[in-house]
Image (tube, helix red, strand yellow):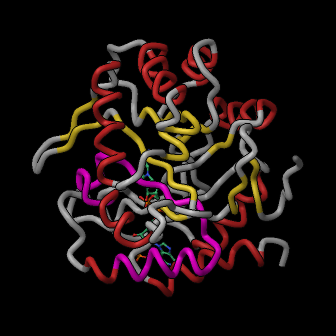
Amino acid sequence: MTNNQNTTFTFLNGRTVNRIGYGAMRLTGQPRNFGPYADWQGGIDLLQRARDLGVTHIDTARAYGPHENEKLIADALLAEDGTYGDMFIASKGGVEKSATSISRDTSAATMKRHLEESLASLRTGNIDLYYVHSPDGVTPITESVAALEEMRQTRKIDMIGLSNVSRVQVEQALKVAPIAAVQNRYSPADARDDELENMIDWLNEQGIAFVPHGPLGANPMKQGAAVDPGDALRTLLARSPNILAIPGTTTIAHLEDNASALETQHA
Ligand SMILES: NC(=O)c1ccc[n+]([C@@H]2O[C@H](COP(=O)([O-])OP(=O)(O)OC[C@H]3O[C@@H](n4cnc5c(N)ncnc54)[C@H](OP(=O)(O)O)[C@@H]3O)[C@@H](O)[C@H]2O)c1
């Protein structure tokens, strides 16, 4: 299957998503993306508006809340037949959050436990894409990925992703299992990083999606884009056909603006 380079990306397993997705992290308690989102119904409305706009790729993580962001997504997007239909849900495990701290544990046992918890929060038996959220610096990436590969073999997830990783870690992981997506921080607002630029091109050659987090240059713990959102999204879409944007927002007006970057990228 070929990609329509303007608007869609097709993963290695044949699943296609629109290249403007939605990063749901900010639909959580503030500050620190901890606890449930204060305006629960507003969050449901926003996620359903995203679906109606054709935004199919929703990015979340067990750590957002924790659990609360995934539960909100289930309340908003789970269909009566108990599936997410055309919606593409990506989540992550391996990060633990409390009211005052954040820590990483990407051991095999924790990755499996976190994935089971994500399945429960999302009220589903299968997640489209599940990332190692951030390697803990102790567990070899091959161990974390082997644990997810076991879960992929039993169809609890369709694809494996890696977040906050180097190219070397991706190469190590590829020896254990197919990797469908890499999610690292990247934005036109950030200083140029040649290693990352080369990695994006290499991932594209492998057919692996690159999902920049903080695409508008925002500080994840603070409100506000660092650059003009429309310009940033058009720049990202033009940079490489494997880039999938997941801008975050808490307002439907901004969601609509961001979704329209897909139509205006050649304007
Ligand atoms: N893997 C990781 O370690 C990791 C880390 C951080 C984030 N992420 C993922 O990346 C996603 C996006 O990151 P992010 O939300 O931190 O940053 P971002 O997308 O760079 O920026 C979000 C900020 O920009 C503002 N904004 C969005 N659209 C706008 C528009 N059209 N006009 C004006 N302001 C606009 C939002 O404010 P308003 O609410 O006012 O619109 C929000 O404060 C997250 O949701 C999460 O899924 C992953």
Instruction: State the image quarter where residue 264 is shown.
Output: bottom right
- Closer to the camera, 75 or 197? 75
User: x%, y% of residue 200?
Assistant: 70, 37
Residue found 35% across the figure and 19% down from its top: 108
Instruction: State the image quarter where residue 4 is shown.
Output: bottom right
100 to the left or right of 133 = left
- Closer to the camera, 203 or 152? 152
Residue found 71% across the figure and 49% down from its top: 15
Q: Is residue 164 above or below residue 89?
A: above
Q: Which span of residues is magenta-colored?
A: 43-69
Magenta span contains residue 68: yes
Magenta span contains residue 90: no
Residue found 64% across the figure and 74% down from its top: 54
Quarter containing ligand 1? bottom left
128 to the left or right of 9 = left
Q: Residue furthest left?
A: 100
Residue found 69% across the figure and 50% down from its top: 243
